Image (spheres, rainbow, N blue to C red):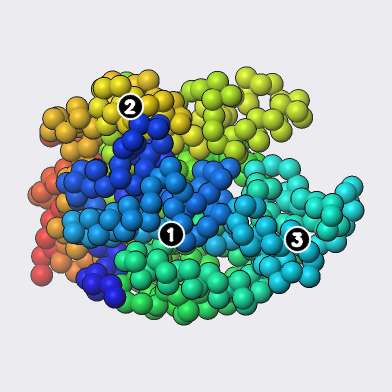
Amino acid sequence: MLDKKKWGWWRDAVFYQVYPKSFQDSNGDGIGDIPGIISRLDYLQQLGVDGVWLSPVYDSPQVDNGYDIADYRAIWPPMGTMEDMDRLIAEARARGISIIMDLVLNHTSDQHAWFQRALQSRDDPYHDYYIWRDGTPDAPPNGLRASFGGSAWTYVPHLGQYYFHQFAPQQPDLNWDNPTVRRELYDMIRFWVDKGVEGFRLDVIDVIGKDPDRGVTCNGPKLHPLLDELSREAFREEGLVTVGEAWGADLERAKRYSALDASELSMVFQFQHILLDQLPEGEKWDMVPLRLTALKRCAEHWQQGLHGQGWNSLFLDNHDLPRIVSRWGDDTTYRVQSAKMLATMLHGMEGTPYVYQGEELGMTNIRLPIQAYADAETQCVYAERVARGDPPEEVMASIYARSRDNARTPMQWSAEKNAGFSQGDPWLPVNPNYREINVQDQLADPNSILAYYRSLIALRKRYPVFRDGTFTLLEPESEKLFVYTRQTDTEQLLVVCNFTGETVPYERPAAFARAERLLGNYDPAGGALRPYEAQLYYQRRQA
């Protein structure tokens, strides 16, 4: 049984995402592993986080870096053993850190035993574990396309059928209409809970209710009944936290996902803010400049809309996104200042913050030759766009800005060989700037980005207004300043962020004239805000 605090404990928590393949290699094979994570738990404890979201460590052929699971109840051998996993759970718990496992319930690997049986015959019971439609080699069931490019249907000649996959062909979608499939998944979840896992991040969970015959992949009509059953059968144990990744979530759907009665999930990962700097009808590779007013309206929409009705995740970085300091900050002249400003803007809001590994250092995007990218999505988009006639240099410019491998380069621990990540050749190149950006140097610097994150995390735990305060946007029409307040009956918080590399005039509201300055990324000074300056003020309210 879980011994974690109380129901809803995650509302006071800060989580840290570990991408295991790139976090710490313990044996010199160039691949991060579970013993490596264990060796860095003291670092995470000192940072102040309450839980670790662990990207997949299950046995996998690694077509999609572990999001193609071949065995839900086994560990990928280069990552370690089940004994290592048991020790990680125990060692983390001893430090007050929960392990939150990434869980892919929409699809498996094509190497999973279920799919291998499904391939044998239409009459095999496992055939119905996946989604099949009759067809001929030149006529797929419909024109649905996979997220990684190409058709969402792959033909199997000896069966005379297509199987459906929303991602790579090696990731066939499970048939959630089959109750036996659902029972298999629920039993597997209990296996991990019995081991001491204290929650799950549910990968692309908003696509399990799909209706491919009607062209519906996301937010299908069966989604919420399926989520209710999933929660009832597998998750409603006191203290268990569940996080739903939902690219298609709007506010009303998010209220259902994260309702405070936990009828579905604990919180939602929604991405409306992340979509603001791409063409509305385009893909993530089709970029437009971020408009700060749009970002502020989006934040206001979610902060006010979910308050008292649901719970949001707060994030700017993760394993699927480019580094935020390269995306919305300045990763050259003002890297330190802009990284701190972005953190201040995010951590002042209502919701549960997620720090992605290296974000607390201000790690940046990387530029690689196309053959060096390991990400299946990156390789697919390059091939597809060049084939349709896009200039290769334009495609590469998008990849430099948006590739998921930007976030997956090895963690930069020190200025030593391979950034202290591995004594062997890393599976993905280390960013060359590791000599200037690394944990060892920042631990020794009280003004580092890392030190700033530790302060922010500590402040969230000290002042209830971070959890409970209402959100009010100030300066709504400014394209340079992001300013807002959080307020309860007894506390007030003012967050001031200059989103530009310019000096911007600003006068603090009179109501906060005597407020205490909790944190800032420059030494205190009056008058205008300096480039990427952030300020955080607090005061008790008069009775």
Amino acid at the residue labelled 1: Arg
Number of other residues with Cα within 10 Å of mark 1, as a class: few under 14, some 14 to 19, many 20 or more: many
- Seen from the viewer's position, the closer of residues 269 and 300 is 269
Position of 390 relative to 148 (above/below): above
Query: Quadrant of the rendered structure where residue 235 is?
Result: bottom left
Which x, y percent locates residue 401?
51, 30
Q: Is residue 426 left or right of residue 382?
A: left
Which x, y percent locates residue 236?
40, 77
Amino acid at the residue labelled 3: Gln
Q: Are marks 2 and 1 in contact (CB under 8 Å)?
A: no
For mark 2, what is the residue? Answer: 423
- Seen from the viewer's position, the closer of residues 94 and 286 is 94
Q: Which of the marked residues, 3 or 1, is nearer the chain's N terminus?
A: 3
The residue lying at 43 percent from left, 42 percent from top is: 78
Q: Estimate the spatial distance between the alpha carbons at disc 2 and disc 1, rounded to whole Å.
A: 31 Å
Number of other residues with Cα within 10 Å of mark 2, as a class: few under 14, some 14 to 19, many 20 or more: some
Amino acid at the residue labelled 2: Gln
For mark 3, what is the residue? Answer: 120
Q: Which of the marked residues, 2 or 3, is nearer the chain's N terminus?
A: 3
Residue 270 in view = no
Residue 204 in view = yes
Q: Which of the marked residues, 2 or 1, is nearer the chain's N terminus?
A: 1
Q: Look at discs 3 and 1 and give the one toward the viewer.
A: 3
Secondary structure of the residue carrying tag 2 is: loop
For mark 1, what is the residue? Answer: 201
Secondary structure of the residue carrying tag 1 is: strand
Quarter occupied by the C terminus: bottom left
Q: Is residue 430 left or right of residue 126?
A: left
The residue lying at 69 percent from left, 21 percent from top is: 391
Secondary structure of the residue carrying tag 3 is: loop
Q: Estimate the spatial distance between the alpha carbons at disc 2 and disc 3, rounded to whole Å.
A: 44 Å
Number of other residues with Cα within 10 Å of mark 3, as a class: few under 14, some 14 to 19, many 20 or more: few
